[in-house]
Each structure stands twice: as structure tokens, then as C-alpha cells.
Image (cartoon, grey):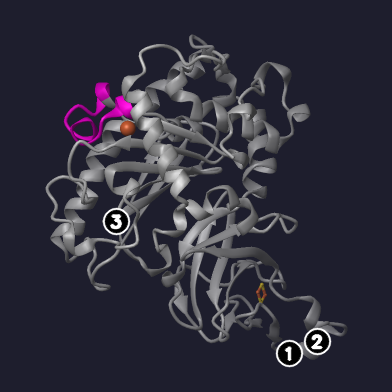
Amino acid sequence: MKPQVAARISAQVENELRRDHYPEGFPALPEIPGGRYTSEAFYQLEIEHLWKKSWLCAIRAEEVPAPGSYKLFERLGCSIIIARGVDNEIRAFHNTCRHRGAPIVEGDGRQKLLVCRYHAWCYDLQGRLVRVPEEHDFGDLDKSARGLLPVRCEQWDGWVFVNLDPDARPLADELAPIRDDLATLSMASLRVKGRMSYKIACNWKAALDAFLESYHVKAIHPQTVAMLLDAKGTAIGLFAGGHTRMALPKRFNREGGTWGTEADAYDIPTVPEVFRANNVAYGVFPNFVSPFDSAGFPFITFWPEGRDACSCELIFVGAGDDTETMENSEYWRTFVENYDKIQTEDFQFLAGIQRSLESGAFTGMKLCYQERRIYWMHEEFDRRIGVERIPPELRVTQLLSPFVEA
Ligand code: FES
Ligand SMILES: [Fe+2]
């Protein structure tokens, strides 16, 4: 992280702690139309133009540890095999046999060759079709033209991303506005310590919104987050591409970890001071947020499961002993349990919010300055989908570009 970025975050926090009036020059935010959370047409636009064209965080690289290891990524109606080849490259393919479409593998595993279970067509770990039983009976089969269909697959510091759009720009370009800030976390060297997942009866954006602002901290987290962090000092950054940052100064436990844990043994030594004095969360477009900390943190991702249902998955990573996880370590078990408490507090109103939106009694969301990350993401959704494709009554006004951090 560049020293000037750290200085900017600290200065913003100081400024917010003192601020007692609406910031001069910042526009009041127009309503976000409620239909963006309920309309089937809007949901389909998101699937086609946002989800199927975005880089999506799928797995950790160490989850396919050896040549031949593979893991299935099943979201958005797709089934994708993520496999490590004999050359150690991680690649992704549609889990769809090029003979008659049977899924090639089920679940995760390790194999030298990927063999379809229906008629035993056989693919290597680069997706090439290498063996077809009774091949002569096809007459004109060109095996080189019937390899598994590839899916774009690139990595960022130990995280494996996929993109269903073959023409997507490289992941590194997509993450450029925030990559430098996060390089100091040494994420490639961290290991998975635990996982949690939740099903929530609301549109995926309603769930994500809860993680983009700290305006709710005093009201719904009085015994958890509010004890640890001072939401009054919340500093926010907006970045090109829909990415965002939110830093909350810590009240105590500056050494990292969560309450009730002894974090020293789990310290990631490269984490800069600004990430120790504050909880610095980044929102990575389109669907994940992570409250980075010096003694472990979760990647929190949100996934649509229809217009009014979603899932939220947390993958906890940390330093320390490679073999320690929430299954065998008091530290990581407590760490995950504490997050579970907070998540449960965050999710309590979401099904009710969705019912309100569906009932027609609620027409739109009125956001405040502290909620501007939500507005910025909505603007970016429209830019990605293409404003002209969106029914006028469901659009948001493009407003916040002048406030993007360079
Ligand atoms: S569908 Fe896969 S071998 Fe026939
Ligand atoms: Fe919260």
C-alpha cells in the first residue's frame, strides 16, 4: 500500500470523527428504485450482462493442490470444473461432455484424466479429448475440435476467479484500482481456515447492501461490531469499476483477530499499520466484500439464486500453522463463531425487506452520505448492463464519478 493511501485513510477517519454537517459539494442521493430488487426483467439483465460478464471469485488455489486435483464451481446455473494440470496451471472448463452433454464429474476429486461416466469419452487436464471408445463408428469425428469448452480462469494472490465471457478484459486490469492496496496482505501465502454459508430469502443486492455501510452498526450490532469499531469515524473510498473501501477505526484489539481471541500467533507480518488501527474492508465488484485484518479475515461473497433469494458464503483465510482450521483450533473456531453472530445480526431484516419491496408498499430506497457505496455500486450495475437496456423507471442517475479516488 502506498504511504499516501494510508495517510488518506487516516485523514478521512479523523475528519469523519469531527464531522457534524452534510459534506459540502456532495449531492443528496436520489432514490434507488425498489423494482431493481424485485423485477424479473431487471434480474435477467443482471444475469446476462453483469454476472455472465464479471470476474467471479470461485475457489482458493490451494483447494486444487496437486496436478489432477479438481473442484466444481456450480453457480448461476453453470457447472464449471476448475482443475490443476500436470503443468501446474489451473484451468476451467464447462462440466459438459462434448458427446451428448453429460456432466463429466460430480463433486471434487483428483484424476489423471477426466472420463465422462456416460460413454467414457476421455479428456486430459487441458480439456483435450484424448480417447473415444469405438471411435471408428463416428465416421468423421475430429477429436481436436471436441475438447471441453474452456472458461476464462485467472488468479489474484491465491484466489481463483472465473469469467463466463471469453472476451472479458484480464482480471488484473479489472482489479487495478485496488490491487496495490491489498498486495501487502500476502494473500497467496494464507490458507483456508474455515467456511460458512447462508441462504437468505432476499435479492442478492439487499444482502450485499448490509455490508457496504456502517450506518446500521449502532442499532443492530451494539454488543458485537459497535464494541470493537467506532462507526462514527467511517471513511469511504469509491473506485473505478465499482470497487469500494470502508475503514472503521478500532476501539481496541488493534493486534487483529476478533474479540476473545489471542491473535499474536496468527499475525500476517506484512499488513500495514493502517489495517491494524482500522478495520479496512474492500468491496470488490460485483459480489464480494472482505474486512481485511492482520490476523485473518473472511472473503464474503453473495450469489443470486433467483430474483428473491440468494446465498452468502464466507471463506476464512489466515496465517499461522498450515494444518490449523476451525475443526481443530480454538482460535479459528472462535473467529468463525464470532463472525456467525455478526452475520446473523446483519441478515435478520433481509427477508422482511424483500417482502416489503414485493408488497408494493415500499417504492424506493433513500440513501444517506454514509451509504454512498451502495449508490456507487448501483451506478456501476447500470453501466455494465448498459443504461439503454434498463427500463427508465428502474435506472439510477449517474452521479458519483466526480468522487472517485484516483
Ligand atoms: S455424453 Fe459423455 S461420453 Fe457420451
Ligand atoms: Fe453489519
Q: How many residues crowd mark 3 within 10 Å: few (<14), some (14–19), many (20+)?
A: many
User: Residue drawn at (56%, 81%), measured in percent from left and top?
Assistant: 85
Taking 101 as reference, is 240 above or below it? above
| Label drawn at residue 134 | 1
The residue to which callout 2 is attached is 137
Q: Quadrant of the C terminus?
A: top right
**Residue 10 sits in quarter:** top left
Verify whether residue 220 appears in magenta: yes
Q: Which residues are magenta?
A: 218-233
State the predominant SS element of the stretch in magenta.
helix
**Residue 231 sits in quarter:** top left
Q: Label 1's element?
A: loop
| Label drawn at residue 296 | 3
Q: Residue 204, image x and y in percent?
A: 49, 36
What is the three-letter code of the residue carrying label 3? Gly
Query: Rounded to the nearest whole Å, what is the CA distance between mark 1 and mark 2?
Result: 6 Å
